[in-house]
Image (spheres, rainbow, N blue to C red):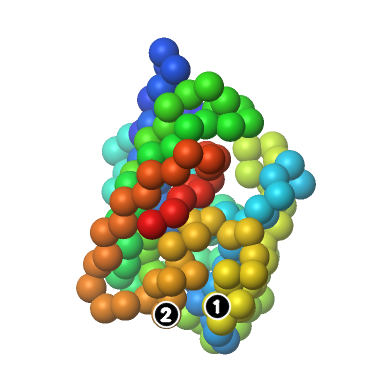
Amino acid sequence: MKENDCAIRGDGLWFRYRACGLIIEDGCVLFAGNNTEDYYYSVGGAVHVGETAEEAAAREVFEETGVHYEVDRLAFIHENFFPGEGSLAGRICHEVALYFLMKPRGTQALHPHGTSNGVAETMHWLPIEHLREYRAFPAFLADCLPVPPGITHIVSRNEKTGSKGRERQ
């Protein structure tokens, strides 16, 4: 957690305000992965103090993909409640994430930087029609892609989950 992140950590509690980019190209959606976790997670991260969620989504997408994607629109608001595991073990966690649909570029070519907070990170294009076959979070995307019109609000409460947005509807 960085000093300027919109996040709180202490007294057994953890909260984060997160912005994410939904990048869809050729029937696939982009997810991130790393060598310390056994699942894929959405491209995004904490909103910084003084930054809008839309600005944070565009920044995070660039930081993780090396590509300047343009924001199309807000697609999902996700309130996620979960007990922490890993570095958040023993904490009660609450994350509010805004998912912005990014405008497609007509190519899956990326220029990833390779690390996020010192952890080697990789980008993965997962086929939307087979998304349920992957351990990919947030899991609600398997039921909500292609992105419906308007803004969808999702609340998830889960007994077993982690900090990257695992949930169930």
Q: How many marks?
A: 2
Q: Is residue 163 left or right of residue 155?
A: right
Q: Position of residue 133 (x, y in %)?
A: 64, 70
Amino acid type of disc 2?
A: Pro
The residue positioned 70% from the left and 57% from the top of the image is 122
Mark 2: give few (<14), some (14-19) or many (20+) Cα within 10 Å.
some
Q: Nearer the viewer, residue 35 or 166?
A: 166
Up/down of 80 relative to 126, above or below: above
Q: Residue furthest front?
A: 159
Q: Residue 66 bears which disc, if any?
A: none
Up/down of 164 relative to 103, above or below: above
Separation of marks 1 and 2 at Cα, in angstroms: 8 Å
Which numbered disc flags the more N-terminal residue, 1 or 2? 1
Q: Which residue is mark 1?
A: 128
Q: Position of residue 2 (x, y in %)?
A: 50, 29
The residue positioned 59% from the left and 59% from the top of the image is 136
The residue positioned 43% from the left and 76% from the top of the image is 145
Mark 1: give few (<14), some (14-19) or many (20+) Cα within 10 Å.
many
Q: Check if mark 1's residue and mark 2's residue have beta carbons within 8 Å.
A: yes
Q: Nearer the viewer, residue 97 or 70?
A: 97
Q: Which residue is mark 2?
A: 146
Q: Nearer the viewer, residue 107 or 136?
A: 136
Q: Residue furthest right?
A: 35
Tag 1's secondary structure? helix
Up/down of 76 relative to 119, above or below: below
Amino acid type of disc 1?
A: Ile
The residue positioned 46% from the left and 66% from the top of the image is 141
Tag 2's secondary structure? loop
